[in-house]
């Protein structure tokens, strides 16, 4: 089997190509979570049989390119679909529209919503005695939303130990660093106080991610705070706020793909 690091590199190349072709933003946000999605889809999640699959929800839906690229490399979404991303009369929107047959489980865009839909799905699976897990990826800026903390209170109450949230903690959001805009530290202590089994890992360390995702949650919902770098994998994009919205030009594409070769 191909190493996860090689798969993640291919996913990042596709993200760069999609961003360049579409002239769309959010490439930095997509690159930061590529290793997390690679670990989920190519190591952790049960996807066969499809009808009983584990569910992944990208709550930070502006990073849609990361999910589309991962689904394409997994063979769930087709290459023609990817090529029609963010085009007039195309195939895929910049934010997610629900299409379960293609692996997009919920529509997204409004931050804080996908997280709670995931908790609802996990609760429903438990009520139906279905052995299915739900994973949701949120952003650190997204965790400023009040709806996140409503869900944080609700999930332990209903015993949603089949729900895992992963925070893409890259410490950059649209207008600056979350820690400067709305300080939320100590983050781990807060989630633990809300009744979650909470871990902190390097979000680019595949073995650390794998172990955290598979660790027993002790009968609680699980929160994995994944420390990441926005724009990971492309030197001139890494930890640069401008790449939340900046467009990938021909020169940017050429340099990025050279680095990812």
Image (tube, helix red, strand yellow):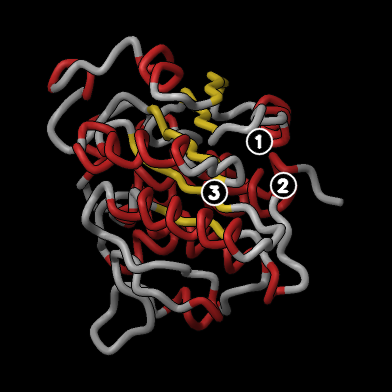
Residue in the picture at 64% in, 48% down? 40
Residue drawn at point x = 61 percent, y = 46 percent:
162
Q: How crowded is mark 1: few (under 14 residues within 10 Å), some or many (20 or more)?
A: many
Q: Residue furthest right?
A: 1
Residue 158 vertical position relative to residue 74 in the rendered view, above or below: above
In the foreground, 120 or 113? 120
Horizontal side, residue 103 vs residue 150: left or right:
right
| Residues at discs 1 and 3 in contact (Cβ within 8 Å) | yes
**Does label 2 or label 1 sit earlier along the sequence?**
2
Q: Name the residue under label 3.
A: 135
Q: Are marks 2 and 1 in contact (CB under 8 Å)?
A: yes
Taking the spot 41% from the left edge, 59% from the top edge, the residue there is 65
- In this view of the protein, can residue 165 be seen by the observer? yes
Q: Mark 2 points at which residue?
A: 44
**Side (left or right) of 238 relative to 220:** left
Q: Which of 73 and 215 is in front in this view?
A: 215
Locate residue 10 relative to residue 17 in the image: left or right.
right
Above or below residue 122? Residue 97 is: below
The residue to which callout 1 is attached is 213
Secondary structure category for the residue under label 3? strand
Query: Measured from the top left, where is residue 149 in percent x and y?
Result: 28, 34
């Amino acid at each position: 089997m191909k190493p996860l690091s090689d798969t993640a590199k291919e996913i990042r190349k596709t993200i760069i190509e999609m961003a360049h072709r579409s002239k769309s933003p959010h490439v930095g946000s997509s690159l930061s979570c590529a290793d997390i999605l690679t670990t989920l889809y190519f190591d952790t999640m049960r996807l066969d049989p499809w009808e009983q699959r584990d569910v992944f929800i990208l709550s930070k839906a502006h990073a849609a390119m990361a999910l589309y690229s991962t689904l394409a490399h997994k063979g769930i979404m087709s290459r023609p679909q990817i090529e029609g991303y963010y085009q007039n009369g195309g195939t895929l929107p910049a934010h997610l529209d629900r299409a379960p047959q293609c692996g997009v489980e919920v529509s997204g865009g409004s931050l804080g919503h996908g997280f709670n839909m995931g908790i609802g799905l996990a609760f429903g699976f438990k009520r139906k005695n279905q052995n299915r897990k739900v994973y949701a990826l949120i952003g650190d800026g997204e965790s400023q939303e009040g709806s996140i903390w409503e869900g944080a209170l609700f999930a332990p109450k209903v015993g949603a130990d089949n729900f895992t949230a992963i925070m893409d903690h890259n410490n950059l959001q649209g207008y600056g660093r979350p820690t400067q805009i709305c300080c939320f530290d100590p983050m781990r202590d807060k989630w633990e106080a809300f009744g979650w089994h909470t871990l902190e890992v390097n979000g680019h360390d595949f073995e650390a991610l794998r172990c955290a995702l598979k660790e027993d949650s002790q009968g609680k919902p699980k929160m994995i705070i994944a420390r990441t770098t926005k724009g990971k994998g492309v030197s001139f994009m890494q930890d640069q706020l401008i790449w939340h919205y900046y467009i990938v030009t021909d020169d940017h594409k050429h340099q990025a793909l050279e680095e990812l070769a």
